Image (spheres, rainbow, N blue to C red):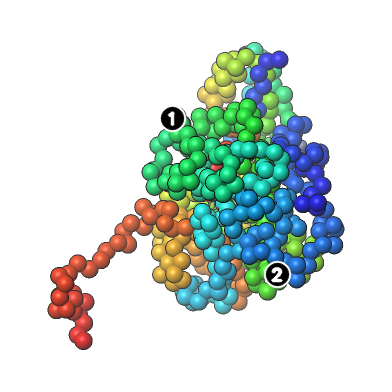
Amino acid sequence: MANIAALRCKECSREYPVGAFNVCDFCFGPLEVVYDLEAIAQVTSRDKITSGPLSLWRYADFLPADYNAQIDINAGFTPLIRSSGLAKKLGLDELWIKNDSVNPSYSFKDRVVAVATAKALELGFETIACASTGNLACSVAAHASRAGIKAYVFIPSDLEKGKVLGAAIYNPTMVAIDGSYDDVNRLCSELADQYPWAFVNINVRPFYADGSKTLGYEVAEQLGWRAPEHAVAPSASGAMFTKIYQGLKEFEQVGIIGNVHTKMHCAQARGCSPIATAYEEGRLVIRPVKPATIAKSLGIGNPADGYYALKTIEASNGSAVIAEENEVADGIKLLAETEGIFTEGAGGVAIAGLKRLVERGTIKKNESTVVYITGNGLKTTEIVEDVVNPIHIDATVTAFEESLGLKA
Amino acid sequence: MSPLKRVRFTFLDRLIKEPVIYRMSHDFNVITNIRRADVQEGVGWVILELEGEILEIERSLEWVRSIGVRVDPTLGDLVEP
Ligand SMILES: Cc1ncc(COP(=O)(O)O)c(C=O)c1O
Ligand SMILES: [Zn+2]
């Protein structure tokens, strides 16, 4: 934490002191945390990381907040699994699955919220908040419970019940808002201006976003201190995608790993693909869209980091890929059937995107590839309800054998 | 001081050539202050701050939308999935 120097505008490079601000007063550009990588290089090492906690806090030297046991629900350090079944099916020699669906509140959002909450406490906040339709709300509510602080979670009132439960169980103050999506957005920006709360993805966003750098560090460590040739990740705001690459590049810059040549591939679903569409059209300008996708956790129509995701694609020689809506459920099932991992819509998009990248020849057979599975299937069971198809029989051996054509 | 509002306009195709911001400040009692912009072939955006009475700002934005310009929050969506 001693290693963070300032906040800096990503557009005009003006610097600001470290605090709860996310926008440049001058050009309204987003702020990001500036690290003193030379100072970090002095204190970090592979040994130090390896002997650290089995959570994202093993990378504390690279994070903008100090470890704080008060907020710790053990986010991060999730399994990286060498694929066999899926790799064979896709014809890849070296495919790895980063299973971030097994975080404490069942999505990668625990990484960003852990860092945002630790920073919020450092900055003196006693309440954390967010507006969310799913994973973010779950994580904010869970971290607030652990920390013993208040959480305000704003949701659109027409949300499905199942989505709300995963957050409500932690007993935050949950506010359901009547009105359009734009109304909810507007209200939250007004509240963030007026209340002394840390809105994790608004006023403490620069710190929040950097929690996702650990998805880069962790994969590099788990691969035996190297970066893969390809990484495929699902995107909504584009923040996680951008930060995975920043994490890999920082490891390179401080000498923890060798040269990084990872091509970053951003996967979105047809019904909400502003980043991938801009990529396909060869532009760096995002046209906002109205989200209409089955992969609801990727439903951001006006992505805050869309432009930076496009720059990451450009810098890494990567690409973007669109999963058709009907491929999302197929992707979820394919991962479950070949690897025993049950992911949600975002993971279905990542798997469908990976498949397309292989078919296109963008990812070649012998190139090492990591696919990021960022959320858990038990939160979006409605997408794959049709798999429930048991064979109904009477409780006799004969009925069992007849129905399956078996004979003992 | 009058209320301020930050917005992002996205223009497509023919609208890029229209003097939308000039007409906005001319036809409504709203001061426009451009902070950042990018215009490319076929699409462009402008981030600006508007100053005026809230109702007048809303009326001016209604008009901007009515001619086909997209109006969004400058920070992107604040509701995250
Ligand atoms: C499961 C899951 N995966 C991916 C994302 C996309 O993250 P980002 O908004 O950083 O692009 C989200 C949330 O937005 C999510 O909930
Ligand atoms: Zn700036």
Q: Earlier in the sequence, mark 1 or mark 2?
A: 2
Amino acid bearing label 2: Thr
Residue A178 tag number: 1
Give the residue displayed 61% in from the left and 32% down from the top.
A192
The total number of labels drawn is 2
Q: Position of residue A145 (x, y in %)?
A: 54, 46
Q: Quadrant of the C terminus of chain A?
A: bottom left
Q: Quadrant of residue A56?
A: bottom right
Q: Residues within 10 Å of mark 2 (few under 14, many from 20)?
A: few
Chain letter for mark 2: A
Amino acid bearing label 1: Asp
Residue A183 vertical placement versus A20 (above, below): above
Give the residue displayed 59% in from the left and 28% down from the top.
A190
**At numbered mark 2, what does the secondary structure look like: helix, strand or loop?**
helix
Q: Is residue A20 visible?
A: yes
Along the viewing direction, whichever of A189 and A279 lies nearer the viewer = A189
Q: Which residue is mark 2?
A: A50
Q: Position of residue B13 (x, y in %)?
A: 59, 35
Q: Quadrant of residue A344?
A: bottom left
Q: Quadrant of ligand 2?
A: top right
